[in-house]
């Protein structure tokens, strides 16, 4: 395939062919999400929405990538990655310690449960047989790759001697790699033939495979030998896309992995889709033999937010550096984050006049604000600073006017303004003027990382749009900097595209879109009230944690919608969030959805809701008070 | 035997002669009507017409041809029903009823059998062995000289395995005289444009019966070639299929010649970012095929796959995944390639992303005649007497 002129368009795991390119693009910060015992417990489960980086993590632990990083560990670009992998125990300075064997669960397995006229036990037998075959084939292929020897040659010279007591019907151990490969290959072929056969299956295929996950027991320390070369001590089976197995198959897989106490370790990467709504919304339980890693949750912990920003920026800069057509050392350096120039100054001055006129009109009718207005008139600053200050003042004036208490019409002292003013009001003012005067709002490097919503793929897609413009400008000999207006346009286009594709992308897509439309309209309605009551804005909702059971029992459709939206990262979930002395189930909008509703990107602003209200957002039966806020005209009160 | 008025192609032979590379039978419009009139005289007997039961206004176009050619009385109609999808609006139910009533008007003496298909997980996907069982059951409904699968009102995930099972059954029986297998397909870009996929299955899948060794770990060392036959509005399909197949090489097929001469260019514009930036397709890999002739597409695919096989043989060979994103007529070309090449030992499969909900924007109140004003029925004779040497 062609070299890509825009490396942001490559998804790390699937589209990067060369191991060295993959390793160079892999940002070591991703390993922060892995607990230190990940390479010692029998089972590690990686869960996330699509695009959070699971497949990349799995690919990192394949032998050719590990060996490449180990050998090049002294080079500047690999130093950090190498150190982190060593700390995890993936390799020592002398040798790779784990033999990663990747297997995709997206292929064939689930179809085994759909064969006509076949009972559950027979289907599970086929599943275990196929999984045994694929694990064996993948381990042998990985071992050959580790030895940098063509598979056929390696198989002929390799010896397999499993631990005592491990047997395979029809195979006499010790045997050659070729014999074991032939056994597994035949088994895989027999199972596949059952699926591809046009016609009823008259008899059970001759599987000659035990009804257990014996493949995990085969490869103990020293079970594989290839001439004089030492092979990694432990096998790490890397199962990707586990969500595509049927529920029965996933259960059998987990049970078999933990029951056998086998020498091989297993990593399973799965999306939340595979989980029932209650599992998605509550989270699986960890045991002493299982490590559960929920990638987004890790990044969303407050202690890790800065790490995430750092990780995404580095990721972007790594991608920018490998572009073939242009020399761009950093994406950040090419993103302008200031609105400057005569065109903007003129626009700010016009906007300032509008806001000043409005505030002064109020001041003419209500003398209480005389000193506040006089003080503001005396303040110096750029046109934009003045605009923001006047808009802040307008919010404060609205708040005072909205108060019920009597103040006898006394002129308000400037110190009273200081008491009620704050940085959050400044943020609200910036948001309000951006919307009112159509100024760019979503721009700058920090905004770009915020818009990722803890999702690597979302970040790469957006950064890729930015980078495309930078490349095009450079190729045309123009300035490569991306101005705020253009950044804002690209972000809004991406948000709109994401919004439109919800029905085709997510389970219950239409229903989710309807729900989010109402939720987003409500958030925008509250955010843009003249008094800016929830500065800088509302970007989420919450219900009481104790209502969780009632959600499943009384509102199962709402529970499914919330679970699917979380699974696709449209909602970011924070269980057990403590606020006002109570525990809440908190949901924030994906930050791209915030753009769709002109909302700010900060966290912290959410509104508590009853389940009945949330279900109303689903069904369109919306309370009249909310309806007014949302600008809905046809709801039912 | 059929008159020579139909499109009967011939082409230069290749290293390995494909079944339809040389001779084929394809007809539409008046030639199709004449073909079936001639067949009544030259190859008489009973006809089994297999069709989908539903609201699609094109459901009865095949029956119209048989009726006009005087086959009524010799026809058994198998109306297939299946699970999946969502409840349709009332206006579509009216169309479904109108279809049924029209069918009985067109073929008043025909035997009509409703046949339920056992689909997986309430979807449109039928397993290979269920398709085989279905075909055995249908064939046993009588002694038929002609079996017609009318795919006009059937989803792809259903008609691919059923057509393959039919051909497989005909090939396996080696009956004397042979069973004549036909496919009817209605082409109507206007109507197709009014039935658009809205909600999709989460992931693509190899169609049952067309998995081959594409998913096999034993052959993971072989390169994968993906050949998508492009049509409009399929970016999400293409993206998900790419993820599922994970190909080493991509050869998109563009329609040319086409009724709209700019169609291929427009498709390139539509998919430019996806194909050339994200998936890094080599422009020289693009294949062009006549949008009105599935046999031509079959030839192009046959030739391309053979070229890749011979080029990659020294490094272990290759596996090919086909996917159809264009019209149903073109999809039949994909079906023929996959069936025939798999039967002759090639490593080839078909990958597909099923729609779980379609957005239907045509006005059902217009009635069947108005809605099918631009529809053109094509008939492909796939197996039987015309191929006996």
Image (tube, grey):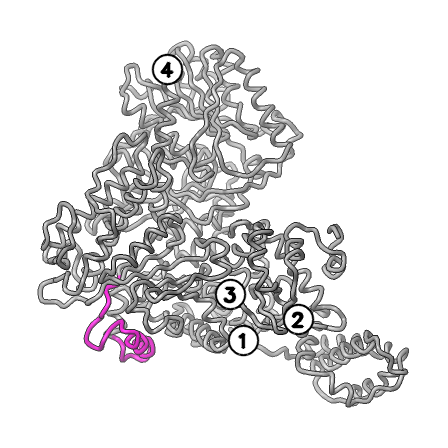
Mark seen at residue A62: none
The reply, left or right, for residue A181 in relation to residue B141 is left
Q: Distance between the residues labelled 1 and 4?
A: 72 Å
Q: Is residue B75 magenta?
A: no
Q: Is disc 3 placed on a helix, strand or loop?
A: helix
Tag in front: 1 or 3: 1
Q: How far apart are marks 2 and 3 (CA)?
A: 23 Å
Q: Is residue A76 magenta?
A: yes
Q: Distance between the residues labelled 1 and 3?
A: 13 Å
Label 1 CA crowd tier, 10 Å (few <14, some 14–19, many 20+) = few
Mark seen at residue B145: 4
**Do the residues under discs 3 and 4 have CB atoms within 8 angstroms?**
no
Point out the stretch of residues depicted in magenta.
A72-100
Query: Residue A44 location, x and y as percent?
Result: 34, 64
Residue shown at the point (28%, 76%) measured from the top left: A86
Q: Distance between the residues labelled 1 and 2?
A: 18 Å
Label 4 CA crowd tier, 10 Å (few <14, some 14–19, many 20+) = some
Label 3 CA crowd tier, 10 Å (few <14, some 14–19, many 20+) = many
Mark seen at residue A462: 3
């Amino acid at each position: 395939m062609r070299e890509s002129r825009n490396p942001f368009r490559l998804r790390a795991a699937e589209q990067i062919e060369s191991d060295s390119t993959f390793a160079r693009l892999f940002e070591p910060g991703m390993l922060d999400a892995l607990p230190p015992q990940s390479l010692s417990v029998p089972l590690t489960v990686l869960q996330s929405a699509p695009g959070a980086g699971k497949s990349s993590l799995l690919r990192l632990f394949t032998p050719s990538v590990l060996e490449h990083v180990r050998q090049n560990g002294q080079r500047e670009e690999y130093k950090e990655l190498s150190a982190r992998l060593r700390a995890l125990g993936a390799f020592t300075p002398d040798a790779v310690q784990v033999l990663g064997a990747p297997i995709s669960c997206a292929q064939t397995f689930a179809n085994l449960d759909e064969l006509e006229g076949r009972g559950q036990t027979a289907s599970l037998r086929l599943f275990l047989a196929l999984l045994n075959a694929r694990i064996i084939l993948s381990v042998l292929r990985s071992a050959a790759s580790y030895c940098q020897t063509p598979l056929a040659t390696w198989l002929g010279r390799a010896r397999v001697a499993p631990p005592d007591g491990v047997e395979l019907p029809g195979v006499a151990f010790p045997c050659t790699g070729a014999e074991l490969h032939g056994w597994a290959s035949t088994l895989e072929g027999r199972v596949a033939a059952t699926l591809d056969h046009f016609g009823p299956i008259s008899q059970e295929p001759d599987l000659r495979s035990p009804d257990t996950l014996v493949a995990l027991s085969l490869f103990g320390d020293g079970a594989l030998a290839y001439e004089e070369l030492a092979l990694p001590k432990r096998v790490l089976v890397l199962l990707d896309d586990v969500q595509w197995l049927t529920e029965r198959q996933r259960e059998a897989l987990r049970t078999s992995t933990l029951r056998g106490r086998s020498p091989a370790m297993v990593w399973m990467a799965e999306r939340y889709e595979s989980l029932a709504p209650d599992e998605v919304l509550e989270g699986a339980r960890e045991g002493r033999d299982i490590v559960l890693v929920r990638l987004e949750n890790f990044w969303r912990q407050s202690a890790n937010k800065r790490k995430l920003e750092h990780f995404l920026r580095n990721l972007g800069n790594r991608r920018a550096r490998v572009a073939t057509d242009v020399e761009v050392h950093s994406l950040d350096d090419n993103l302008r984050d200031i609105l400057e120039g005569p065109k903007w100054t003129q626009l700010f001055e016009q906007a300032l006049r509008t806001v000043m006129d409005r505030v002064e009109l109020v001041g003419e009718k209500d003398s209480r604000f005389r000193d506040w207005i006089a003080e503001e008139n005396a303040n110096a600053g750029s046109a934009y600073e003045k605009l923001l200050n006047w808009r802040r003042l307008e919010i404060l004036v609205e708040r005072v006017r909205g108060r019920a208490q009597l103040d006898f019409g006394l002129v308000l002292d400037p110190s009273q303004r200081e008491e009620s003013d704050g940085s959050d009001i400044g943020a609200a003012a910036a948001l309000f003027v951006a919307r009112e005067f159509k100024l760019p709002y979503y721009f700058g490097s920090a905004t770009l990382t915020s818009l990722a919503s803890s999702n690597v793929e979302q970040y790469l897609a957006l950064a890729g749009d930015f980078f495309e413009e930078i490349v095009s400008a450079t190729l045309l000999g123009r300035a490569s900097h991306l101005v705020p207006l253009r950044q804002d346009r690209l972000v809004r286009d991406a948000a709109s595209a994401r919004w439109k594709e919800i029905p085709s992308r997510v389970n219950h897509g239409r229903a989710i879109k309807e729900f989010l439309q109402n939720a987003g309209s409500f958030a925008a309605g509250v955010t843009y009230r003249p008094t800016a009551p929830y500065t800088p804005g509302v970007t989420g909702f919450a219900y009481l944690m104790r209502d969780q059971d009632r959600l499943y029992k009384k509102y199962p459709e709402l529970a499914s919608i919330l679970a699917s939206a979380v699974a696709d990262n449209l909602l970011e979930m924070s269980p057990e969030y403590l606020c006002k002395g109570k525990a809440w189930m908190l949901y924030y909008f994906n930050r791209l959805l915030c753009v769709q509703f002109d909302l700010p990107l900060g966290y912290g602003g959410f509104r508590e809701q009853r389940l009945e209200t949330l279900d109303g957002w689903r069904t369109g039966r919306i309370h009249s008070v909310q309806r007014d806020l949302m600008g809905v005209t046809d709801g039912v009160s | 035997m059929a008159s020579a008025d139909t499109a009967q192609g011939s082409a230069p032979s290749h290293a390995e002669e494909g079944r339809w590379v040389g001779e084929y039978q394809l007809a539409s419009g008046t030639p199709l009507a004449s073909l079936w009139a001639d067949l009544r005289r030259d190859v008489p007997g009973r006809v089994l017409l297999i069709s989908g039961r539903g609201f699609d206004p094109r459901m009865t176009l095949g029956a119209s041809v048989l009726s006009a050619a005087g086959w009524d009385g010799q026809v058994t109609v198998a109306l297939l029903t299946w699970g999946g999808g969502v409840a349709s609006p009332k206006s579509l139910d009216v169309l479904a009823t109108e279809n049924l009533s029209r069918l009985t008007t067109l073929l008043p003496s025909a035997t009509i059998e409703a046949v339920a298909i056992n689909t997986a997980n309430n979807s449109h996907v039928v397993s290979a062995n269920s398709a085989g069982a279905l075909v055995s059951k249908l064939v046993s409904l009588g002694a038929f000289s002609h079996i017609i699968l009318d795919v006009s009102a059937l989803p792809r995930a259903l008609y691919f395995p059923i057509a393959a099972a039919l051909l497989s059954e005909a090939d396996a029986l080696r009956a004397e005289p042979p069973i004549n297998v036909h496919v009817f397909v209605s082409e109507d870009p206007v109507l197709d444009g009014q039935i658009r996929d809205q909600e999709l299955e989460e992931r693509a899948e190899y169609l049952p019966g067309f998995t081959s060794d594409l998913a096999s770990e034993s052959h993971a060392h072989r390169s994968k070639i993906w050949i998508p036959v492009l049509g409009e509005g399929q970016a999400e399909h293409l993206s998900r299929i790419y993820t599922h197949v994970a190909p080493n090489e991509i050869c998109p097929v563009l329609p040319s010649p086409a009724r709209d001469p700019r169609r291929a260019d427009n498709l390139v514009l539509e998919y430019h970012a996806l194909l050339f930036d994200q998936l890094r397709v080599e422009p020289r890999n693009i294949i062009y095929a006549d949008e009105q002739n599935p046999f031509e597409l079959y030839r192009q695919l046959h030739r391309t796959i053979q070229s890749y096989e011979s080029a990659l043989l020294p490094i272990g060979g290759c596996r090919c995944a086909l996917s159809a994103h264009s019209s149903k007529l073109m999809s039949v070309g994909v079906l023929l390639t996959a069936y025939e090449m798999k039967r002759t030992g090639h490593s080839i499969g078909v990958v597909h992303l099923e729609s779980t909900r379609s957005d239907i924007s045509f006005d059902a109140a217009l009635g069947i005649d108005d809605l099918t004003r631009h529809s053109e029925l094509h008939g492909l004779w796939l197996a039987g007497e015309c191929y006996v040497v």
